Amino acid sequence: MTKDAKPGPMRNLPLIILLGVALIGAFTLRDYLSFDALRDNREALIAFRDANMVLTVLGFVLAYVVIVGFSLPGALIATLTGGFLFGTFAGSLLSVTGATLGAVIIFLAARHGLGDRLKARMDASEGVISKIKTGLDENQWSMLFFIRLVPAVPFFVANLIPAFLSVPLYRFVISTFLGIIPGSLVYSSVGAGLGEVFARGESPNLGLIFEPHILFPILGLSALSLLPVILKAVTGKKDLTK
């Protein structure tokens, strides 16, 4: 064992801690990070924001980092809260910033615990696994944006896959920040209109992102992100026929 090598359990410790906190949070924070909690505390939140704007901004971003970094429930409610407190665009920017920083925590923990070993196994493998890894390595930007833009890909999974494939950190950060902007804007805009929703005693339409006029443009961006992969595949096939 080299000087810098760590025993297996210690190497996996960051990922184990994240998973442990996520499980505990899933059972203990459901009632606190909910739409009902936001509705019941909206006046107190607005009053605190008006009296402490900078502290509210910093606290919101930090809370979002913790929620995403430890995979706690409530990321959607946090995005709604950002829109409610800061408006559509400012709320979306703060949510995207917090989500990206939280995603980096998961990314680094997964890479530290499992990424290097999985990469070594994939590098040494042959056949289908080797071809899949080669395809992802050659089209990292396209695939990173694709998994961020498609609503069906869980955020936690989209954080782990790049870590296991040794994607450079700067690519992960850029693709995460830009790729989650569309969804964040949608839910921040819903949050910005919560004042009227609360006044009517109604609940917001949280399935808005799956409505055609919202979903189709996002899917269009997803397809556009794959265009370089498609063009490369078509070009490659043409070259093989020469």
Image (tube, rainbow, N blue to C red):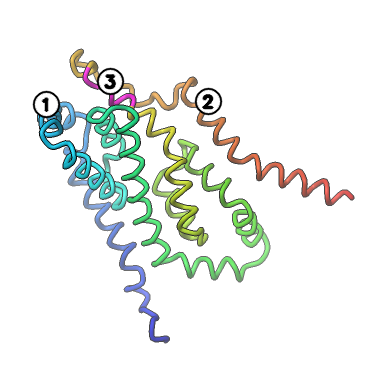
Tell whether 98 sits left or right of 166.
left
| Mark 3 neighbour density, 10 Å: few (under 14) some (14–19) many (20 or more) | some
Q: Is residue 194 above or below residue 86?
A: above
Question: Between disc 1 and disc 2, whose residue precedes?
Answer: 1
- Whether residue 191 appears in magenta in the rendering, the answer is yes
**In the image, which is nearer the foreground, mark 1 or mark 2?**
1
Residue placed under numbered mark 2 in the picture? 216
Q: Is residue 116 above or below residue 66?
A: below
Picture residue at 60% right of the left edge, 35% below the top: 224
- In the rendered structure, which segment of residues is drawn in magenta? 189-195
Q: Residue furthest top?
A: 200
Disc 1 from disc 2: Cα separation: 36 Å
In percent of width and height, residue 87 lies at: 28, 27
Say which of 34 and 168 sits in front: 168
Picture residue at 36% right of the left edge, 79% below the top: 6
Say which of 43 and 23 sits in front: 43
Task: Specify the quadrant of the image occupied by residue 223.
Answer: top right
Picture residue at 26% right of the left edge, 39% below the top: 74
Amino acid on which disc 3 is placed: Gly
Which quadrant is home to the N terminus?
bottom left
Question: Between disc 3 and disc 2, whose residue precedes?
Answer: 3
Q: Main secondary structure of the magenta part?
A: helix
In percent of width and height, residue 112 lies at: 39, 67
Disc 3 from disc 1: Cα separation: 15 Å
Task: Specify the quadrant of the image occupied by residue 136.
Answer: bottom right
Residue placed under numbered mark 1 in the picture? 43
Residue placed under numbered mark 3 in the picture? 193
The reply to whether dot 3 and dot 1 touch (C-beta < 8 Å) is no
